[in-house]
Amino acid sequence: MPKDFSDVRIVYVKDFEYGKPLYRFKVYTPPKEFGKISGHRFVSLVNDNNIFQNDLQVLLGFIKRQPFIETDHTIVGNKLEQPIIDFVSEAYGFTDVETFGFEDLKNGNDDFHFIRDLEYTNENGERVTGEIKTYSNPRKVGGNIKSPVTHLDWWLQTRLEIEVLKEEGEKGKVFYYFVDEPTRNAVLNDRAYTLKHKNLAESDDIIKYGKNEEDPYIINNFPNQGFKTFKQLMDYAKERRDEMDTVYEDEEGTYYYVEVPLKYPFYHKFDHVKNYLNDIKEQIKIEEYKGE
């Protein structure tokens, strides 16, 4: 059954800052209880290098007013997740494989929660957290499906899970599967397909460092922000969440406020915020403020 979003109204202004568009959003709604920081929200909050960052989408998720947008990518990813888990487990000889559903949310903490893809025992007898990631564009992993480069967003999701659940020195790992066009079409049309070993790869171990121990991966990937520990990233995520969880009021009612800049020069041809507004406009009332 579709969710009711009738208690939400979005008013926005699109102007320019430093020569590029900047969206300013007022989300009018009675104050809501903010949700926890999920793995996807965590990535969106801390990865300022993501040129397609969208704080409006993150805010709507926090107040549970984010319409579900189904795409071919999400359909294929959902349908392939369990088959790939089985494929990975056999290919790498994993034992005691455990998968998770919504019940895993309770294993988070007061600020963060997530749903793991799997836990398994590796050949060394270590219990490891695994994440399955499908992709169809090799550029997502540095252009090489045989030796993929771990995408920062995927690393952050997995690292959050082991930070909350694991002891210092314990591990997580990302497993990548390249979905070629024939497989994609077969999955979408419920036809038979075969998973291929050449399209499967694994990341290096993702290790939980000590609470205040510097992590080289964080240092290398957040040079401008100066983050050095995972704790600093988590604190930053909570700060950004708290900024969003601020209720304002004007003559039209109570609202939340976020800004979304367009960070790329090709916005004349592609505008991810405009596309998102088009995707949700049938479910949420959206108005562009034109002034007097």
Image: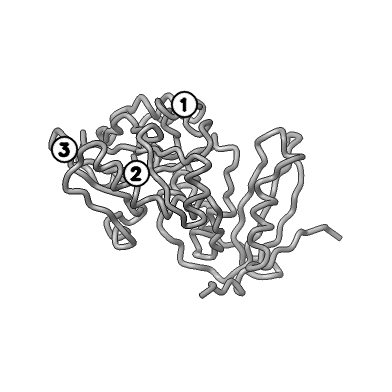
Dot 2 or dot 3: first in sequence order is: 3
Going by the image, does 45 lie left or right of 263? left
User: Which element carries disc 2, helix, strand or loop?
Assistant: strand
* Residue at (37% x, 50% y) in the render: 81
Badge 3 element: loop
User: Can you identify the residue that label 2 sits on?
Assistant: 131
**Amino acid tagged 2:** Glu
What is the total number of numbered labels drawn onto the structure image?
A: 3
In-image side of 64 versus 132 (left or right) = right
The answer for how far apart the CA atoms under marks 2 and 3 are is 16 Å
Label 1 near label 2: C-beta < 8 Å?
Answer: no
Task: Give how far across and how far down residue 34 sits, in percent.
Answer: 46, 62
Question: Camera-side residue: 240 or 66?
Answer: 66
Q: Quadrant of the C terminus?
A: bottom right
Q: Give amino acid for label 1.
A: Asn
Please tell me whether mark 1 sits on a helix, a strand or a loop.
loop
Label 3 vs label 1, nearer the camera: 1
Q: Position of residue 67 (x, y in %)?
A: 56, 63
Crowdedness near tag 2: few (<14), some (14–19) or many (≥20) residues, C-alpha within 10 Å: many
Question: Mark 2 or mark 1: which is in front?
Answer: 1
Which of the labelled discs sits on residue 221, or is there none?
none
Name of the residue lying farthest toward the right: 292
Counting from the top left corner in percent of width and height, residue 197 is at: 35, 35
Do the CB atoms of the residues marked 2 and 3 lie less than 8 Å apart? no
Q: The disc labelled 3 sits on which kind of residue?
A: Glu
Residue on which the image places disc 1 = 144
- Label 1 environment density (alpha carbons within 10 Å; few <14, some 14–19, many ≥20): few
